[in-house]
Image (cartoon, rainbow, N blue to C red):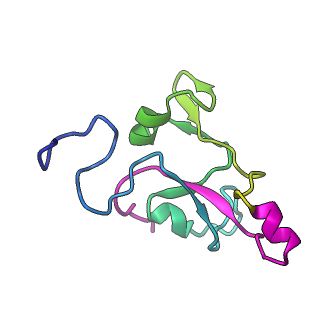
Amino acid sequence: MMQHGMNSPFGMRSGFGDVPVGAVVAFAGGHSPANSNDNLPNPLEAWGWMVCDGRSLLAVHYPELYAVLGYRYGGQGEQFCIPDYRNASLPGAETAATTGGDVKGIAYIIKYTYGLVPLAR
């Protein structure tokens, strides 16, 4: 059993309710694309999440996520990639679509760091 404050080998803190870095979840809320032209910060990224769109990231900017993913989804050298789940569907989505359920607007997001990220002003 880990004692409070010890480093976890799984890239997560030992606090109650913490989501581990690298966790991927389905998200039905609004999100703006990574290449948005509106120059506004993405609210998801301010909370330590980003859309799983396959983008390439610098390991020095996202060391916690790089420690979990490595080159599993591509990349080499100083860059690694996050998974690309833009065309993925939720299990059972085909059933919901045929029965009139609304499954549009679902995105997969990945946790890339702990806590809040300071927004640039």
Q: Is residue 97 above or below residue 2?
A: below
Residue 121 vs residue 61, the one in the foreground? 61
Residue 97's spot in the image, x, y percent? 84, 69
The residue depicted at 44 percent of the width and 58 percent of the height is 48
Instruction: Read off the magenta span.
Output: 93-121
Q: Is residue 100 above or below residue 16?
A: below
Residue 6's spot in the image, x, y percent? 15, 42
The residue depicted at 81 percent of the width and 65 percent of the height is 95
The residue depicted at 40 percent of the width and 38 percent of the height is 63
Corner quadrant of residue 56? top right
The residue depicted at 85 percent of the width and 75 percent of the height is 99
Query: Is 108 colored magenta in this rendering?
Result: yes
Residue 63 vs residue 67, the one in the foreground? 67
Residue 64's spot in the image, x, y percent? 39, 41
Residue at the top extreme of this rendering: 77
- Which quarter of the image is occupied by the C terminus? bottom left
Query: Is 62 colored magenta in this rendering?
Result: no
Q: Could you tell me how many numbered marks the image carries? A: 0
- Which quarter of the image is occupied by the N terminus? top left
Q: Is residue 49 left or right of residue 33?
A: left
Magenta stretch: helix, strand or loop mostly: loop
Residue at the right extreme of this rendering: 98
Residue 34's spot in the image, x, y percent? 65, 56
Q: Is residue 21 above or below residue 80?
A: below
Residue 87 vs residue 91, the one in the foreground? 91
Corner quadrant of residue 84? top right
Q: Is residue 102 above or below residue 87?
A: below
